[in-house]
């Protein structure tokens, strides 16, 4: 091979290696793939035209907040309409935690666009990987959303241990399973079914969303409906 060709080949290989390394580094930093949103093939009914029945009580438990201290879970599920998602930061499934995150981001924009909803709702993202998702890791995962509480606070929570987490998962009927490598050792990948819970200000679950039903407009109408229900109850 001519000398110039060898130099060009070496340069191409070096550039390819740099691109792969940069891509891997970005993946390690974010662990958040592009979300794959299901196609919405229906028009959601108008807010207030349907009933959101009580499904269950949101469970109680001990969680670690942004300040690194223990708090009761009910401090984040009562007093406001709450959209709670159970996630973990290492999730790489585009129809899993990434979809929950991106849906919440879009829904947040729509809630903030309606002044009458300001101060009426909150978002909560709770990790089921306490070993790796420390409270610092959760705040990093939330980024600016974790710091900006105007109009609609978004809390990124974890727990101290699986022992503290278990009653919360049991209460929400959320099953998780650690995936094992070829030697039978646990990996950082956790199998789970995506669930988000809409909870009223009294701490009652009124809707449960799975992957197929994560549509911001429909979810916004559910929040509007609960606000209308609250306002009607105050008259």
Image (cartoon, helix red, strand yellow):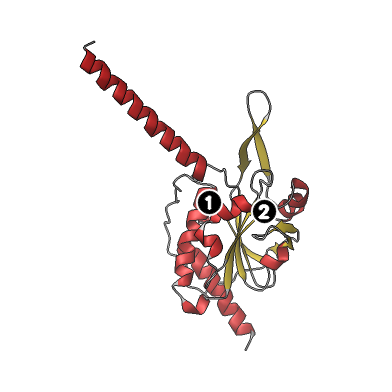
Q: Residue at x 72, y 66 (%)?
A: 74
Where residue 4 sits in the image (x, y, percent)? 21, 17
Q: Could you tell whether 158 is left or right of 98 in the image? A: right
Secondary structure beneath dot 1 equals helix
Closer to the chain start, of discs 2 and 1, is 2
Secondary structure beneath dot 2 equals loop
Question: Which residue position holds label 1?
Answer: 211
Q: Residue at x 75, y 61 (%)?
A: 60
Which of the 4 image quarters holds residue 124? Answer: bottom right
Where residue 172 sits in the image (x, y, percent)? 69, 55
* Neighbours of disc 1 within 10 Å: few (<14), some (14-19), many (20+): some
**Quadrant containing the C terminus in the rendered view:** bottom right
**Quadrant containing the N terminus in the rendered view:** top left
Where residue 179 sits in the image (x, y, percent)? 64, 34
Q: Residue at x 74, y 46 (%)?
A: 162
C-alpha gap between disc 2 and disc 1: 22 Å
Q: Residue furthest top?
A: 1
Q: Could you tell whether 52 is left or right of 38 in the image? A: right
Which of the 4 image quarters holds residue 81? Answer: bottom right
Tell me if residue 30 comes above or below residue 69 in the rendering. above
Question: Which residue position holds label 2?
Answer: 158
Q: Is residue 185 visible?
A: yes
Q: Residue at x 56, y 43 (%)?
A: 91
Tell me if residue 156 comes above or below residue 92 in the rendering. below
């Amino acid at each position: 091979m001519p000398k110039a060709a060898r130099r060009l080949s070496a340069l191409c290989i070096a550039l390819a290696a740099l691109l792969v390394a940069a891509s891997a580094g970005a993946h390690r930093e974010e662990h958040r793939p592009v979300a794959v949103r299901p196609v919405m093939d229906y028009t959601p009914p108008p807010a207030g035209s349907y009933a959101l029945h009580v499904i269950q009580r949101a469970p109680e438990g001990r969680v670690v907040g942004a300040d690194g201290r223990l708090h009761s879970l009910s401090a984040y599920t009562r007093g406001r309409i709450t959209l709670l998602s159970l996630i973990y930061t290492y999730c790489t499934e585009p129809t899993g935690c990434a979809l929950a995150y991106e849906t919440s981001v879009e829904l947040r924009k729509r809630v903030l666009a309606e002044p009458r909803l300001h101060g009426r709702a909150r978002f909560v993202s709770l990790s089921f990987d306490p070993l790796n998702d420390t409270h610092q890791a959760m705040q990093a995962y939330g980024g600016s959303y974790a710091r900006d509480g105007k109009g609609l606070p978004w809390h990124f929570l974890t727990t101290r241990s699986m022992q503290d987490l278990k009653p919360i998962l049991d209460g929400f009927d959320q099953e998780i399973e650690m995936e094992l490598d070829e030697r039978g050792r646990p990996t950082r990948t956790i199998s789970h079914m995506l669930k988000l819970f809409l909870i009223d200000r009294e701490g009652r679950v009124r809707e449960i969303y799975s992957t197929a039903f994560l549509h911001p407009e429909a979810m916004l109408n559910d929040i509007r409906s609960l606000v209308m229900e609250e306002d009607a109850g105050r008259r």
